[in-house]
Amino acid sequence: MLTTRSADGAPNWVDLATADLEGATAFYEGLFGWQFRSAGPEAGGYGFFQLAGRTVAGGQRTESAPAPASWTVYFRSPDADATARAAEQARGGVPVAPLDVLDQGRMAVLADQTGVPFGIWQPARRQGVDLAGEPGALCWVELYTLDIARAAAFYHAVLGWETSAVPFPGGGYTGLNPAGTGEDALFGGLVPLADDPAKAGSGPHWLPCFAVDDPDATAARAEELGGTVRMPAAAVPGVGRMARLEDPQGAHFGILAGRPGQG
């Protein structure tokens, strides 16, 4: 389960890119109670989603050609430039080269061998999100991939991740944890793309999951707010009770009740 005491390689930030930031703000405020605060004119329109004054995510308006709204998961790096080089050496890509974000930290957007984008964040003044693993905050991430072994090898080379088999009746789950931390620090999992009923026909992708107390009620509320339920709430052994949603602008995310990896 995620906490704000993230180790290198663990998720420490997540942000939303959308053409309709006002619409997205209204949706997530109604769903999670988030409020949006601009980071100021020097941030180019970027801002923060906050819950009770604590930052849980970032958000920005896409100004270029229309593109589907999307969430990007970021992972903590001690050296963004070295991590970007490691991604290239592992036959991935660097769509956005490392750059400083004011005095807050250094970031980049990388891509794995199948083109799935993900971010890295090297902290300076900002360590990452202020809240994690609690209702309304990021609690788990999943990579839906065509090749579990290939993905595991890539992210091990780039971010040092370790994997573990999380068995459950009738199947298994590939858990992820930062290097040297053990299974108590699981933060996500690798899932065969064929097992993703919510995005049939789509390619590999990262899915951020936000903690809620009642996934069924939250999914119903998402529909009331104009969102879509892509996968109704269901029990996922070893993870919790989970649903897959889409906001009105098309960004996909999960909601989860439970403590993944702890039973």
Image (tube, grey):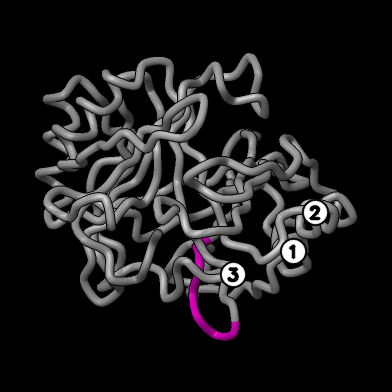
Secondary structure, mark 3, is loop
Task: Give the mark nearest the N terminus, 2 or 3.
Answer: 3
Can you tell which mark lies on residue 222?
Answer: 2
- Asked if residue 117 shows in the view, the reply is no
Q: Is residue 121 above or below residue 176?
A: below
The crowding category of the residue bearing disc 2, from other C-alpha atoms within 10 Å (few below 14, some 14 to 19, many at least 20), is many
Residue at 55% in and 16% down: 194
**Label 1 near label 2: C-beta < 8 Å?**
yes
Q: Amino acid at mark 3?
A: Pro
Distance (Cα) linking label 1 and label 3 = 11 Å
Secondary structure, mark 2, is helix
Q: Amino acid at mark 1?
A: Leu
Distance (Cα) linking label 2 and label 1 = 6 Å
**Magenta-highlighted residues:** 52-58
Distance (Cα) linking label 2 and label 3 = 15 Å
**Label 3 near label 1: C-beta < 8 Å?**
no
Magenta region, mostly helix, strand or loop?
strand
Which percent across, then down, holds residue 101?
30, 63
Q: Amino acid at mark 2?
A: Ala
Can you tell which mark lies on residue 135?
Answer: 3
View extreme (right): residue: 224
Which percent across, then down, holds residue 28?
70, 62
